[in-house]
Image (tube, rainbow, N blue to C red):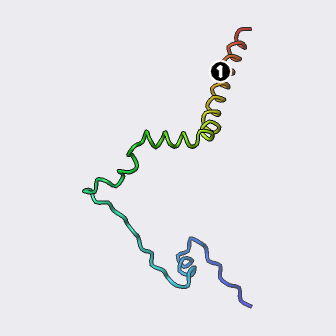
Amino acid sequence: MTVPLLVKESDPRHRINMGKVPIRLREVVYTLSPFEQTVMNGVFKDVPEKLHRKFSENWVDVGVFFLAPVAATFAYANNFLEKEKMHHRH
């Protein structure tokens, strides 16, 4: 009975034996011409209108997930500051 030879990962033969068929990887590079000026035109067009529409359509979500945590954090910070002031008074 023969024991197979254990090959360490640092051994260069380990990389050769890992795959059966070598695969050549290719790189895909997308470039943008410096003369193209209108690629991001639609992103920044009518920003106030887009923000107003998003807030008006989702005002419940904005109130619950943005304004409520901000208000709660502000109230907690003020309460903590007041308690700290009172603690140092005595």
What residue sits 63% from the left and 26% below the top?
Answer: 74
Question: Observer-nearest residue: 27 or 79?
Answer: 79
Tell me residue 20's x, y (percent): 55, 85
Residue 25 is left or right of residue 4, and the answer is: left
- Viewed as shown, does residue 45 lie left or right of 80? left
Q: Is residue 28 above or below residue 85?
A: below
Residue 10 relative to residue 34: left or right: right
Which quarter shows the C terminus?
A: top right
Residue farthest top in this picture: 90
Q: In the rendering, at what x and y percent does residue 45 appear?
A: 38, 46
Asked which quadrant contains residue 69, the reply is: top right
Q: In the image, is residue 47 above or below residue 74? A: below
Query: Which is more toward the observer, 13 or 88?
Result: 88
Horizontal relation, residue 28 to residue 8: left or right: left
Callout 1 secondary element = helix
Where is residue 57 shown, x and y percent of the image?
Answer: 56, 43
| Residue drawn at x 55%, y 74% as measured from the top left | 11
Q: How many numbered circles are shown?
A: 1
Taking the spot 41% from the left edge, 70% from the top edge, the residue there is 27
Q: Badge 1: how crowded within 10 Å, few (<14), some, or many (20+)?
A: few
Q: Residue furthest bottom?
A: 1
Q: Residue sitting at 66 percent across and 19 percent down?
A: 81
Q: Quadrant of residue 64?
A: top right
Question: Vertical placement of 37 versus 86: above or below?
Answer: below
Quadrant of the image containing the N terminus: bottom right
Return the residue nearer the eye: 82 or 58. 58
Amino acid type, residue under disc 1 in the picture: Asn
Q: Quadrant of residue 83?
A: top right
Q: Nearer the viewer, residue 44 or 32?
A: 44
Residue under numbered circle 1: 78
Residue 5 in the image: above or below residue 8: below
